[in-house]
């Protein structure tokens, strides 16, 4: 079995795995279809999530992908991905959640991974509880003072790959920065909160 990526030369008579975009798949049908990257921030893309019109277009494309399958459809999503050298958690795509429960079966390891993470976090918390109780008020005040003295993220610093800290979302990495009038629209992949789109002028962001 081989891999075919040139859709123009695709033949149904060839025993091969066909790799293509959803756009390229229009008009084609396969017994088995795999749709990868089904996470918010990827499919749908980060820019589409905050734009109803683009979100609807992404939903339509997802429908195109789903209807390419004649017998079986597999939709895969990753619990985390490496973005600019940091692991970022991604929520499962809204498009998967919109499929009625009676029409889908969860056969992946995501639930097992979540259970493992919860058990691991509980173990870490138990072992760190004694250490946490030894944190003094002076240490807390010193950390708070250090954060308050940090410079607010500027347009000059707001570049892809830059590490930032958000008051609510925590540490993240700028994926894209798009000029919007006098402001800058930032797409940021936060380590624990996934991908968010924020405006630089109002977001409580600090350079890390």
Image (cartoon, grey):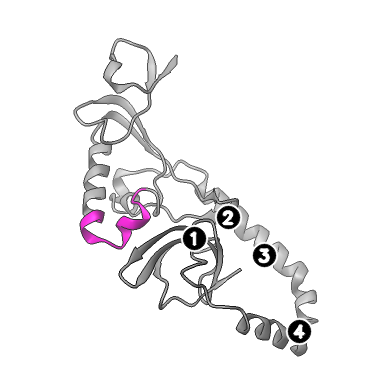
- Give neighbour class at mark 2: few <14, some 14-19, many 20+ (Cα, 10 Å): few
- From the viewer's perspective, is residue 88 above or below residue 36? below
* Front tag of 3 and 1: 1
Comes first in the chain, label 2 or label 1 = 2
Comes first in the chain, label 3 or label 4 = 3
- The CA distance from mark 2 to mark 4 is 33 Å
Q: Nearer the viewer, residue 199 or 109?
A: 199
Q: Which residue is mark 3?
A: 122
Give the image location of residue 98, x and y in percent: 29, 53
Q: Is residue 195 visible?
A: no
- Residue drawn at x 42%, y 72% is 200
**Magenta-drawn segment:** 43-55
Give the image location of residue 205, x and y in percent: 51, 74
* Front tag of 3 and 4: 4
* Front tag of 1 and 4: 1
- On the rendered structure, is 86 left or right of 27? right
Question: Which is the main secondary structure of the residues drawn in magenta?
Answer: helix
Tag 1's secondary structure?
loop
- The CA distance from mark 1 to mark 4 is 32 Å
Q: Which residue is mark 2?
A: 115
Comes first in the chain, label 2 or label 3 = 2
- The CA distance from mark 3 to mark 4 is 24 Å
* Front tag of 2 and 1: 1
Q: Are marks 3 and 4 in contact (CB under 8 Å)?
A: no
Tell me, yes or no, whether the highlighted magenta stretch contains residue 54: yes
Give the image location of residue 55, x and y in percent: 26, 55
Q: Nearer the viewer, residue 29 or 58?
A: 58
- Give neighbour class at mark 3: few <14, some 14-19, many 20+ (Cα, 10 Å): few
Q: Which residue is mark 4?
A: 139
Q: Which mark is residue 159?
A: 1
- Residue drawn at x 26%, y 61% is 51
Q: Quadrant of the N terminus?
A: top left
């Amino acid at each position: 079995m081989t891999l075919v990526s040139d859709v123009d030369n695709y033949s149904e008579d060839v025993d091969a795995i066909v790799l293509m975009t959803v756009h390229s798949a229009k008009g084609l049908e396969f017994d088995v279809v795999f749709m990868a990257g089904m996470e918010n921030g990827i499919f749908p893309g980060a820019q589409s999530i905050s734009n109803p019109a683009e979100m609807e277009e992404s939903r339509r494309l997802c429908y195109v992908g789903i209807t390419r399958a004649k017998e079986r459809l597999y939709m895969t999503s990753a619990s985390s991905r490496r973005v600019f050298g940091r692991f970022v958690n991604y929520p499962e795509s809204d498009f998967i959640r919109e499929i009625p429960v009676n029409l889908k079966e969860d056969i992946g390891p995501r639930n097992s991974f979540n259970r493992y993470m919860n058990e691991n976090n509980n173990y870490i918390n138990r072992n760190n509880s004694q250490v946490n109780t030894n944190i003094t008020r002076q240490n807390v005040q010193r950390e708070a003072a250090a954060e308050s003295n940090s410079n607010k993220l500027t347009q000059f610093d707001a570049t892809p790959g830059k590490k930032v800290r958000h008051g609510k979302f925590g540490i993240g990495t700028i994926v894209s920065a798009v000029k919007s009038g006098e402001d800058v629209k930032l797409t940021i992949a936060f380590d624990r909160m996934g991908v968010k789109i924020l405006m630089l002028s109002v977001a409580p962001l600090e350079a890390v």
